């Protein structure tokens, strides 16, 4: 993402996801995030990009 | 298992026959060498015997029991298997009794999320799937076998307990109520099931894995008004953590399968009181309010096990003796029929001197390939039905919950039912470069599709017992050289049959002409001069967009030489 519009978009996504995790509640957050991942993977329709995203998200989890 | 107070063969709907033991000629000193011995008279052994008999090859079928199978067991018979039964001359019996189906429903938390429609069209002679109890399957095959008294010697209470290769024959030790004897045969088909003694006596082991998940299958008799469809339930109130499957069978019998939960003790799960309690909960859930009778039940694990090699010299393993597959893919019996036919025609060709021994080497890659294909799909199904980790459990829950409103995840919940395997890499499949010239149609190695050729007439009904050539033409004349080619092919395979699929009515001596309304050439992506070479088991050996006589002849020779010609 580049440019201010892209960055503004990312800021908006940041809030949207945070609010949705809160709305799901701690009991359901894992299920919610899993559903979200499946929906996004379906919309993305690009296994290579998905594998990259998984690798990026999985990095440094224990730092 | 049966309810307390009822014997193993006391069924609510099926009258078990008792087949008489007859003293075998070998017990009186006979030492005849039989062309083929078949260990086991289950559906697979019987299908193999019928496949041999229709080719004029005699066999002795040796069966431990004196009746048919104790329960309904394998109940789903596929369209492809019906096309096989048609070739064995017994499909009409099955069609009268069986309940055909084309669709299914999948529920999550007792709400329907998915409607399965199996591929079907007016081009098909048979429905995608039929339900019929295994006792009937065996009964009908036994009745058919009795129409070949000169060719099929069916010996009840004759159990093959061990086998040995001796020179160019197989010697089987057979136990009977009146003593043991040795039976000599040139070949042996081991159709003696999952606990095969033939396999054990050769010291062979099945390899693979035991997938997690156990299933209880139970039959109940009840007046229940619901169409013949497969119903599958995830997280139902009646079995919250695992799957339920419901199938209708003939005679008001309903098959109810449920998966045991991880902590459930399999011994407790099959106690009659527990089976009844679980069934009542499931019947309540589907809204059945009337009475019901418990008929029979059993328990299964989802194993994916097979032999490393299905051929051991003059012994071929067919059906469960070679592979154990999970029940939810409905491939145990259906693949068993395919094994029987594959082994049957190849053995016949070798015994008739039309093919060399190398043809039998193609049995393992083709049929074990089909098994491994089932395993791949079973692995996927199993990971959904019995999630092996928290990650898989979360994904399954996510997919099922999404299915309530979203289309894209619904197919994940469908228990995969595998289609007939394509022998793309088989040594019998040739001319891949010709295959690649097609756009669509039936690929080399795949099984031929049916097409309607009249009000009650279909393409596959025209295939003969041998190799079949399908020659497509626009006009009535055959492409040059084909009548000569047909004669040459008949000198290699006397059962070779040439079928002209013509857009114009035509008559040629010795050639079956089918008038094509365009539906056949469409299904085969054919144009004027296209040629398909079908094997005796209806798989495509090779195909040419425009017939090439020399190549067709060499494809037939290569197929019969097991690819080494």
Image (cartoon, helix red, strand yellow):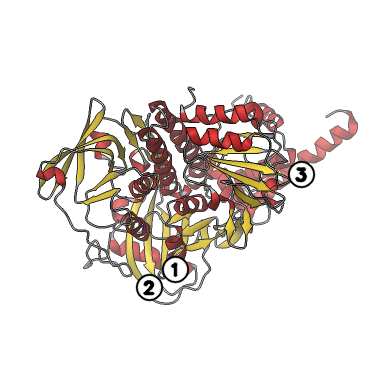
User: Dot 2, how many residues are within 10 Å of its Cα: few (below 14), some (14-19), or many (20+)?
Assistant: some
Image location of residue A42, percent across then percent down? 70, 42
Give the camera-side residue of B137 and B182: B182
Give the camera-side residue of B522 and A55: B522
- Quadrant (top left, top right, bottom left, bottom right) of the N terminus of chain B: bottom left
Q: Secondary structure at mark 2?
A: loop
Circle 2 sits on which residue? B292
Q: Nearer the viewer, mark 1 or mark 3?
A: 1
Q: Nearer the viewer, mark 2 or mark 3?
A: 2
Q: Secondary structure at mark 3?
A: helix
Circle 3 sits on which residue? A16
Left or right: B172 as drawn, with respect to B221: left
Image location of residue B242, percent across then percent down? 46, 53
Q: Secondary structure at mark 1?
A: helix
Answer with mark 1 or mark 2, whichever residue precedes in sequence.
1
Q: Which residue is farthest bottom?
A: B290
**Pointer 1 with pointer 3, Cβ within 8 A:** no
Measured in 3D between alpha carbons, the distance from the residue under mark 1 to the one under mark 2, in whole angstroms, is: 9 Å
Give the camera-side residue of A42 and B329: B329
The structure residue drawn at horizontal position 59% and vertical position 45%, both measured from the top left corner, is B499
User: Dot 1, how many residues are within 10 Å of its Cα: few (below 14), some (14-19), or many (20+)?
Assistant: some
Image location of residue B331, percent across then percent down? 45, 46
Looking at the rendered structure, whether the residues under marks 1 and 3 are on a common chain is answered as: no
Measured in 3D between alpha carbons, the distance from the residue under mark 2 to the one under mark 3, in whole angstroms, is: 53 Å
**Pointer 1 with pointer 2, Cβ within 8 A:** yes
Residue under mark 3: which chain is it in? A
Circle 1 sits on which residue? B283
């Amino acid at each position: 993402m580049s440019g201010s519009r892209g960055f503004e978009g990312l800021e908006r996504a940041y809030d949207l996801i945070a609010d949705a995790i809160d709305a799901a509640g701690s009991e359901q957050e894992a299920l919610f995030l899993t559903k979200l991942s499946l929906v996004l993977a379906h919309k993305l329709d690009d296994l290579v990009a998905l594998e990259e995203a998984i690798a990026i998200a999985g990095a440094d989890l224990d730092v | 298992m049966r309810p307390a107070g009822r014997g193993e063969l006391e069924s609510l709907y099926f009258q078990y026959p008792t087949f008489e033991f007859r003293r075998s000629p070998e017990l009186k000193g006979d030492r005849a060498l039989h062309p083929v011995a078949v260990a086991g008279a289950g559906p697979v052994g019987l299908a193999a015997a019928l496949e041999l008999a229709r080719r004029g090859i005699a066999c002795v079928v040796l069966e431990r029991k004196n009746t048919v199978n104790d329960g309904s067991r394998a109940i789903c018979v596929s369209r492809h298997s019906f096309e096989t039964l048609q070739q064995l001359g017994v499909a009409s019996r099955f069609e009268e009794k069986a309940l055909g189906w084309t669709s299914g429903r999948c529920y999550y938390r007792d709400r329907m999320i998915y409607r399965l429609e199996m591929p079907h069209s007016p081009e098909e002679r048979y429905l995608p799937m039929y339900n019929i109890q295994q006792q009937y399957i065996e009964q009908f095959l036994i009745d058919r076998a009795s129409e070949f008294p000169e060719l099929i010697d069916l010996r009840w209470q004759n159990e093959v307990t061990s086998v040995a290769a001796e020179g160019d024959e197989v010697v089987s030790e057979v136990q009977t109520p009146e003593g043991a004897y040795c039976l000599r045969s040139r070949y042996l088909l081991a159709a003696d099931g999952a606990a095969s003694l033939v396999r054990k006596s050769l010291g062979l082991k099945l390899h693979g894995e035991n997938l997690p998940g156990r299933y209880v299958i139970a039959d109940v008799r009840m007046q229940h008004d619901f169409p013949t469809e497969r119903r599958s339930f995830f997280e139902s109130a009646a079995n919250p953590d695992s799957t339920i499957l419901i199938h209708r069978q003939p005679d008001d019998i309903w098959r109810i399968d449920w998966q045991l939960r991880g902590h459930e003790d399999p011994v407790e799960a099959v106690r009659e009181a527990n089976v009844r309690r679980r069934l009542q909960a499931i019947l309540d859930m589907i809204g059945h309010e009337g009475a019901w009778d418990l008929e029979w039940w059993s328990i299964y694990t989802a194993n994916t096990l097979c032999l490393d090699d299905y051929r051991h010299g003059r012994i071929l393993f067919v059906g469960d003796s070679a592979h154990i597959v999970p029940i939810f893919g409905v491939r145990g019996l259906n693949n068993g029929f395919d094994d029987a036919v594959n082994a049957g025609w190849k053995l016949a060709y070798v015994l008739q001197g039309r093919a060399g021994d190398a043809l039998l080497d193609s049995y393992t890659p083709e049929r074990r390939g089909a098994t491994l294909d089932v395993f791949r799909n079973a692995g996927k199904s199993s990971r959904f039905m019995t999630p092996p980790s928290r990650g898989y459990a979360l994904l399954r829950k996510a997919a099922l919950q999404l299915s309530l409103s979203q289309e894209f995840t619904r197919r994940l919940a469908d228990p995969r039912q595998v289609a007939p395997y394509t022998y793309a890499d088989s040594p019998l499949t040739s001319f891949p470069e010709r295959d690649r010239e097609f756009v669509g149609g039936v690929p080399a190695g795949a099984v031929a599709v049916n097409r309607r050729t009249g009000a009650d007439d279909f393409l596959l009904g025209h295939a003969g017992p041998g190799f079949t050539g399908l020659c497509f033409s626009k006009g009535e004349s055959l492409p040059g050289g084909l009548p000569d080619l047909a004669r040459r092919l008949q000198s290699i395979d006397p059962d070779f049959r040439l079928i002209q699929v013509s857009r114009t009515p035509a008559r040629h001596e010795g050639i079956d002409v089918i008038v094509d309304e365009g539906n056949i050439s469409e299904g085969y992506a054919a144009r004027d001069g296209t040629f398909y070479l079908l094997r005796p088991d209806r798989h495509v050996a090779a195909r040419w967009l425009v017939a090439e006589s020399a190549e067709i002849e060499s494809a037939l020779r290569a197929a019969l030489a097991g690819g080494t010609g």
